[in-house]
Image (cartoon, rainbow, N blue to C red):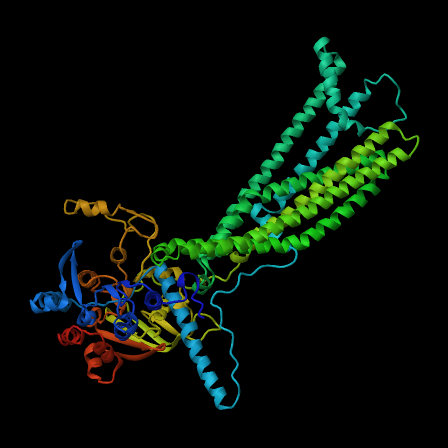
Amino acid sequence: MTDIGANGINLSGGQKWRVSFARALYSRAGTLVLDDIFSAVDANVGRHLYEKALTGELCRGRTRILVTHHVALCLPKTTYSVLLADGTADVAGLTSQLRKDGTLKRILAEDVEEKRKEEEEALKQELAVDDGGGLSKMLTNQSLKSRRASNLSAPELNRRRSHATIENGEVPKKDPPKKFTEDEKRETGTVKWAIYARYIRACGGFGYWTFIIVAFGVWILVYLARSYWISVWTRSYRTESDDDNKVGIYLVQQAGQTIHHYGSKLAATELDGDLRYYLGVYLGISLLAWLIGTVRYFTVMIASIRASKVLFESLTFAVLRAPLRWLDTVPLGRILNRFTSDFAMIDSKIAYDISFMLHNAMQVVAVIIAGVIVSPFMIIFAVVLLGVCLFYALRYLAGAREVKRLESNAKSPVFEQFGSVLTGIATIRAFDKTDAYIERMYKKIDTHCRAYWHLWLFNRWMGFRLNMVGAVFAAIVAALIVSVRGIDASLAGFALSFALNLSEAVIWMLRQYSNVELDSNATERIVEYSNIALEKQGGEEPPAAWPTRGELEVDNLVVSYAPDLPPVLKGLTFSVAQNQRIGVVGRTGAGKSSLTLALFRFLEARSGSIHIDRIDISKIKLLDLRSRLAIIPQDPVLFSGTTPITPATPTSNTNTNIFRSLHSKISEGGLNLSQGQRQLLCLARAIVSRPKIMVLDEATSAVDMETDALIQRSIREEFGDATLIVIAHRLSTIADFDRILVMGEGRVVEFDTPAKLMENADGVFRSLVEESGERRELEEVIRSGGGGR
C-alpha cells in the first residue's frame, strides 16, 4: 500500500492520471468517459496505456469515449470519430466511413499544415524556449519529485537489497513502508513556561502584564475599601455600644440591607449631614471601582487582540516561507486547524479565562486578608481548603491536558477530509461514492467527538469534587460555630460568610487556572508551526540588471527532497548558451521537474552548483532569484480577483474589449477559466515581466494543437532575446528547438541538437520519436532546420 499523501500530493501529474485511469478500468461501468489521459505521460507510456489498457482485455465489451489531442496514436483503433469546433460537432461518423470519403485525410492534412506554418514561423526568428511557472506549479512539481523519490527509488533499493540477501542465504526482513505523511505531533506534560512567555511577549511584554496585574490588585483594594466603608457607616448609626466587637469587615454582606434601609428613610425625611457624607463617599468608591474594573478588562482584551495579530503574522510568515518538503508532508487540514480553531481559542477564550482567573485569585487574597484581620486562625481554614482543592485540580489537569491535545489533533482530519471532498466532489459523484465519503467523514467526526466528550467528563469530574469540597468545608465551619458556646454572633456570622466566600473563590480560581492551561494548547500548537525551519532568505544582492545574457551552467548538481531520501538529481551537468531554446524530455521520474525546482531553489543542492550569467544562484537572495526568472506551469493556480496582469492605459490603437477583459473577475483558483486559458494568462504575465530565462513545465500539454501553435508563436515573437527551457511530453512542441536535453534517473543521457540525436539509432530521443506515433511529422520538422542549428 503506497501513501499518496493528501490530495495525491505524493504523485506526479502522470501518476495521478494513471491512478484515475486504473480506477475507471477496474470499475464495473459499461461506459468509460476519458478526458485526454495521454497529455501528462510520455510517448512510450501513452502507447502502452493505449494498447494494453484502453484497447486491451480490461476494456473489451465496454464503450469508451475518449477526448484527446493525440489523434495519430488513437485513430487506428477508433470506431467512431467526432471533430468538435466552436462547441458543435463539425464532423461525426464511423472512422472507416470518414476514411473512405476522404474527410479524415482532409482533417489530418489541415493539422499537418498548421504544424508547417508553425515551423515556418520558427525559421524567421531565433528563439530560446524555457520552462516557467509560479508557486502553485512549483508545489505540484515538488510533490511529483518527492513522490518519485519515495515511490520509485526506495522500492528499487529494497528489491536489490532483498535479492542480495536471498543470494547469501539469509531471510530478508521486510521494512515497514515509510509513511509520506507523518502522524501529527503533540506535546506531553505541562505547558512549558516558554509558551506562556511567548504569549506574554505577543501581548505586549511582561511590563504590560505587570500593569494588568496591578490594575486587578488596585480593584480588589478598592473593593475592600468599599466594604470597610459600609462597616464604618453602619457602626456610626448603632444605638448600642459594641466596643468589644472588633469585626470591621464582617458587615460586607449587610451592605444591601443598609442601603435599602436608608433609602426608605430618605423617602420620608431630608438627608442630614452625616448621611450625605457617608453616602457620598460610598458612591465615590463605587464609581472608582467601576472605572478600574472597566480598565482592567479593557487592557486584557487589548492584549488578547495584540497577541492574536502577532501570532497570526508569525504563523503566516512561517507557512509562506516553509520549504516545499514541509508543505508536501504536512496535510492542509493541520494548517487550517491552526489558522481557524486554534486562533478562535486565542481570539475569544484565553483572554476571558485569564481575566476571571486573576479576578478570582484577587478575591481569594481579599477574603483571606479579611479573615486574618478578624482572627489569625482563619488562615488555617484557608490553607486546608486551598490544599484539598489544589490536589483535585492538579489531578484533573494531568489527564485533561492530554485529552485536550488529542481533541485538537482530532480536528485536523475533519478539515482535511472536508477540503478533499470539495476538491473532488465531481469525481465522488461520478463514481457514486457519496455515501462512502459521508461515512468516512462521520468516523472522523466521531473520533473528534470522543475526545471532546472525555474532555467534558474530566471537567465534570473536577467540578463535582471541588463543589463537594466547598460544601463540606462550609458544613464543618458551621458545625464548629454551633458547637462552640459563647461565640460572638458577629464573629460567627463572619466565619460562616468567610467559609462560603472563600470556597467559591478558590473553586473558580482553580477552574479558570485549569482553563488557561488547556487554552494554552492553542498557543502551543501555533508556536510549533511558527518555529519550523524556513527557506534561507539571505545572500548577496545580484546586479540590478541581472541576468543580462541568460546563460545557464549546471555543474555536477546533486539534489534530494530530504536528507533521509536518495538524490533525485545525480551529478547533473550541462550548459545553455545565451538565447538558446532547450527542450527537456525523459521518462516519468527522470528528474525533469526536479531540475526546475532546483533552478528556483525550491530544492537546495547537496553538492554541485547552478550558475546564471556566471553567478552562483545559491549565494544570492532567494527573492531576487525568483523575481528575475519566470515559469509557466502545467496546472497554474490563479488567485481570486481581477486578471493578474497590469495593463497599460488604452490608446486609440488598443482594443477596448481586450482592455476590459483584463478587469474580468477571476474565481478562487481560476476555476471559472479553462486550463488553457489559465496557461495563456501565465504566458501574458511572463510577457509583461520580460524575463531573460523562462521555464515551461508541460505548459501546453492540456491544450489543443491550435492553442499550442498560438502559444509557440507568441513565445517566438515575444521571447526571441530570452533563454527558454521547456519540459514537454509532446515532442512536436520542442522538435525545432536548438538543443534537446534527455534525462534519465537524474542524469544527462543525451544533450545535443535534435538532428544529431536522431542520427543515433540507439538513442533515447530517437526511441521517443519512434514511439510517439508522429515520427514522420517530427522528422520533417527536424530536417527543416529549425532544430539543427
- Residue 399 coordinates in the image, percent (x, y): 66, 55
Q: Residue at x 35, y 73 (%)?
A: 589
Q: Residue furthest left?
A: 101
Q: Is residue 739 left or right of residue 174?
A: left
Q: Residue furthest top?
A: 269
Relative to 664, residue 151 above or below:
below
Q: Is residue 304 left or right of residue 789?
A: right
Q: Residue at x 53, y 88 (%)?
A: 170
Please state, as top left, top right, bottom left or bottom right, where the N terminus lies in the image: bottom left
| Residue 115 visible here | no
Name which quarter of the figure residue 48 lies in: bottom left
- Residue 440 coordinates in the image, percent (x, y): 47, 57
Relative to 517, residue 552 above or below:
below
Please state, as top left, top right, bottom left or bottom right, where the C terminus lies in the image: bottom left
| Residue 725 visible here | yes
Q: Nearer the viewer, residue 548 or 257?
A: 257
Q: Residue furthest right?
A: 486
Relative to 580, residue 452 above or below:
above
Relative to 116, residue 654 above or below:
above
Q: Residue furthest bottom?
A: 168
- Residue 272 coordinates in the image, percent (x, y): 75, 11
